[in-house]
Image (cartoon, coloured by chain):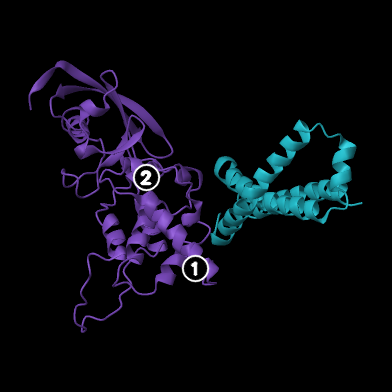
Chain colours: A cyan, B purple
Amino acid sequence: MLDLKLYMAQRISAMIMGPLVLGHLAVMIYAIQGGLSSAEILSRTQGSIFWFVFYGTFVIAVSVHAAIGMRVIMHEWLGLKGVTLPLFTWSLCLILLFMGARAVTAVTLL
Amino acid sequence: MQQTNINTLEVTVQRGTHDAPQDEIFQVPAYENQTILDVVSWIQHYADPSLTYRFACRVGMCGSCAMMVNGEPRWACRTHVNKVLDKNKMHIAPLRNLPVIKDLAVDMDPFFDKWIQAEGKHHPTQTRNDPIAPVQPETAARVEANAGIECINCSICYAACDTVAGNPDYLGPAALQRAWTVFNDAKNESKQVILDAVSGASGCHNCHSMGSCTHYCPNDLDPMSAISGLKRETAKAFFKGRTNA
């Protein structure tokens, strides 16, 4: 159900997410404390390769990490197995990837 | 045995098979220095000779008599009644996570099959014609191996494991601890065979490190740390590109 490759994918994605979560929290607090408007935020992020890479990496790591974690829960708690299990894992991964990529491109591309 | 003032214990025993379990209540005389094994033996001797349960050594060596007592896995022969009694009552049931044959006797086959599946068996480096190789007791690997060799195969850790309950294919703490012990044995060949065996879909990476195995082990062994050792070694092998899983 969770073999070495999936285990490593989940651990490595967690290690990538660690500093990104801290960065994301810091950005949120900075934006709120400073009272930046949406337009001001977008003026800083749109066209920025840094924020594209930052949140792009974040979205990829989250999609991998969450899909594997949910796979375990679906198997152990709801008894999902067979072909349905990888189908669920990949579907969730792609949905998160699509939604995240949509948000990242909207905020960082010109 | 000297009888105490409490007179009787109200003992509920889960009877029957896996498909049709039912509870039966027995009034059992209370004694000082009374174990759970004493209680079930009294029931079989004096109340219902058809009660089925397992035991052999009666001194905590053979690993035969484990059962659920008030919802927790325990070795019956070394568990004092006073330690587990709940308002003069107790509930005794067959081990969790294993198919019930009858009453308190479970089918241990899945438990032992997983030992083999985890390659928790000796892979010799030499033949009987070679001289006996000395084992250095102070090496780090030998210390790790020694930590797990007192396992009595009682299946208490397996019954305590919530991961086994949710994922019946999971190899479980005892088999994985055995694999870790053999992995660290200087006389064991082909460590990668063991790492591959525990890296599959039912392997050590399913462990959530909840620690029930270590908490309930009657011999104070630490299967959770053994499983962590396997995770560490398989991760190292992964980065070196040595994996078939």
Read off the chain for label 1.
B
Please tell me how crowded label 1 is: few (under 14), some (14-19), or many (20+) other residues with Cα within 10 Å: some
**Which residue is label 1 attached to?**
B237
Q: Nearer the viewer, residue A45 or A60?
A: A45
Tell me if B36 is positioned left or right of B238 in this view: left
Residue A75 vertical position relative to residue A3 in the rendered view, above or below? above
Q: Give the position of the N terminus of chain B as an image quadrant.
A: top left
Q: Position of residue A4 (x, y in %)?
A: 54, 60
Q: Which mark is residue B213?
A: 2
Q: Position of residue B94 (x, y in %)?
A: 34, 38
Q: Residue at x 87, y 47 (%)?
A: A106
Residue B128: tell me if it is visible: yes
Q: Residue at x 85, y 50 (%)?
A: A108
| Residue A33 quadrant | top right
Q: CA distance from mark 1 to mark 2?
A: 26 Å
Q: Earlier in the sequence, mark 1 or mark 2?
A: 2
SS label for mark 2: helix
